[in-house]
Amino acid sequence: MAHAIISTNLPPNIDPTKAPIAFGERALPKLNEELQSEDLLTRQRALMALCDLVHDPEFAYQAISIGFLESLKTLLCDEDRIIRQKTTEIFYLLANHNVGRDGFLRSDVILPLSQLLDDPVDLCRVNMHKAFAMLSEFPYGALGLVQAGLVPMLVKKLETEVVEVQELILDTLHFCLNVEACEAIRAGAVSTLKAKLTHPSVAIRSKAAYALMGICVPLVGKQLVCDEGVIPILVDLLGDADAEVRANAAGALMYAIITTPGKFAALHSCAIPLLLPLVKDKLSKVRLNALKCLTILSETSGGRKSLLSQVEVLRELLEDPNEAVQKAAAAALAVVQWKP
């Protein structure tokens, strides 16, 4: 028989860790007020609720419009680790939306967020670097990170951070280096990335080689890569078991060997015997970058002499299913078979 007794337990669809959402247009303003509460539990529950909402770009837009970014910037300095953790998570979620990335730049979020570079909580740093990595994928975002002076700090953190964070930093650096490489070079990025090329992690090796492409765009970067003995390491990576590592190593080598010292450093490291098998690699990116490296090396008399016996191998690539590889093969043949 049923009894008219009211249970003290919450309904099964109520999450006690999250603040209840107000109805309609009052929902987000009420949460914003709770974020500024002096009560720790109230702030925590408001952040938990906000985390669910900002997955939706419409809610993200509304949140930024009513000034949530200023409240969140204040919470980055909170003494409670849960507050900082959820705040950085929300920043990462906002960085996934175009309106969020625009808000980052308009509200000067980058510098306050970068204050967590030394946060003792790993997850806070991971979320922060995820936000920066997402922001850097867009040219205006990468420019904002460079203008905030973040690149030297990221280069320094590569030497001490955990592997997961190193991967995120390398992603961010790659896009920042496409905007401005000289600042990273002055911060010692060449020697730091050189050390990462021999890292046990496949992802770290691959991303370090990828970042080196940006380093090798300016002439000073090419010269440093050659002077600091990076080219022999890149040549060794051409034989790596991972296809992405091979592709990125060949890509970095392609930029580094444009100078005459770079060409001879690659030839002395026996680059051609390692590059030739790569023109038949399953990954088209590997084939393309390898062909471009061979084309550059064939501009030297020693390189052309070595490749003259491989003309038939290069000619076969004119029928490659990838159009870019076909064009690269035609260019390689033209240089190898050139006669004065």
Image (cartoon, rainbow, N blue to C red):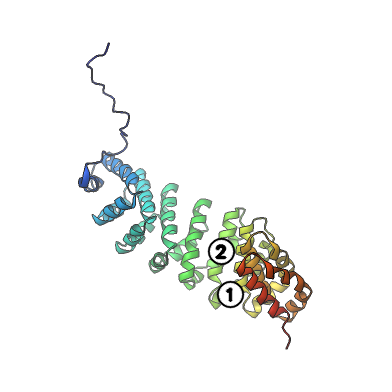
What is the quadrant of the N terminus in the image? top left
Q: Position of residue 147 (x, y in %)?
A: 39, 69
What percent of the width, then of the height, locates residue 303?
73, 77
Picture residue at 45% right of the left edge, 70% below the top? 179
Which residue is at the far right?
309
Residue identifier under label 1: 222
Residue 162, visible in the rendered structure: no
Callout 1–callout 2 Cβ contact below 8 Å: no
Q: Quadrant of residue 213?
A: bottom right
Near-viewer residue (98 or 274): 98
Q: Mark 2 Cα within 10 Å, few/some/many (few <14, many 20+)? A: many
Residue 223: which quarter of the image? bottom right
| Residue 259 occupies quadrant | bottom right
Earlier residue among tags 1 and 2:
2
Residue 210's disc is 2
Residue 37 lies left or right of residue 92; in this view the side is left
Observer-nearest residue: 230 or 188? 230
Residue furthest out toward the top: 1
Q: Residue 239: horizontal and vertical position, in percent? A: 69, 60
Residue 321 point in image, percent of width and height: 64, 64
